[in-house]
Image (spheres, rainbow, N blue to C red):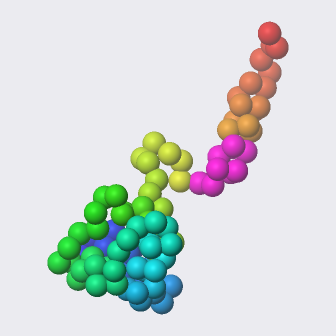
Amino acid sequence: MCRTTNLIFSQKGKLDLTNESISKAMIAAGVQVSGEAVQKYFSGSSGVPLDNLGAFLRTLGLKIVLSETPDISADEYRALKMFAGKYLTVGEDPE
C-alpha cells in the first residue's frame, strides 16, 4: 500500500470511525454519500471523487495542503515571518 493509503487507514482506526460515521460527517459537510460508497473507497473498488476528497479527508482529521504552502499553523507562519523580517534587517539603516 502507498503511504497515503496507510495514513488514511491509520486515521480511520485511530479515530474509531465506521463507514457510516464517515458518511454522516460527509453528508453534514454537504456531500451526499452512503456508507456503502465509503466502504467501496476503503475496499479499493471505487475511488473517492475529487469533488468529495476534501470532505472525506477532513472527516478523517486530515487536510490537503498545497505543496508551496508551509506545513505549520497560520499563526506560527505569521510569527516566523515577522521575526525573520525583523532580524534580517538588524543593522541596516532605516530608509
Give the residue drawn at x 74%, y 38%. 83
Give the magenta-colored segment's residue range: 72-80
Q: Position of residue 50 (x, y in %)?
A: 31, 58
Residue 52 horizontal/vertical position (percent): 36, 63
Magenta span has 2?
no
Q: Quadrant of residue 94?
A: top right
Residue 85 drawn at (x, y percent): 71, 31
Q: Main secondary structure of the magenta part?
A: helix
Q: Horizontally, is 85 left or right of 20 in the view?
A: right
On-image quarter of the N terminus: bottom left
Residue at image x 73%, y 45%?
Answer: 79
Q: Residue at x 81, y 13 (%)?
A: 93
Q: Is residue 67 above or below residue 30?
A: above
**Picture quarter with the C terminus:** top right
Q: Report the residue at 34% width, 84% height from top.
A: 35
- Do we see residue 5 in this rendering? yes
Q: Which residue, as the protein is rendered here, is positioned at the far left? A: 45
Q: Is residue 82 above or below residue 53?
A: above
* Residue 6 in view (yes/no): no
In this rendering, would 22 be left or right of 75? left
- Which residue, as the protein is rendered here, is positioned at the far top? 95
Indicate the position of residue 5 as horizontal and vertical percent values. 31, 73
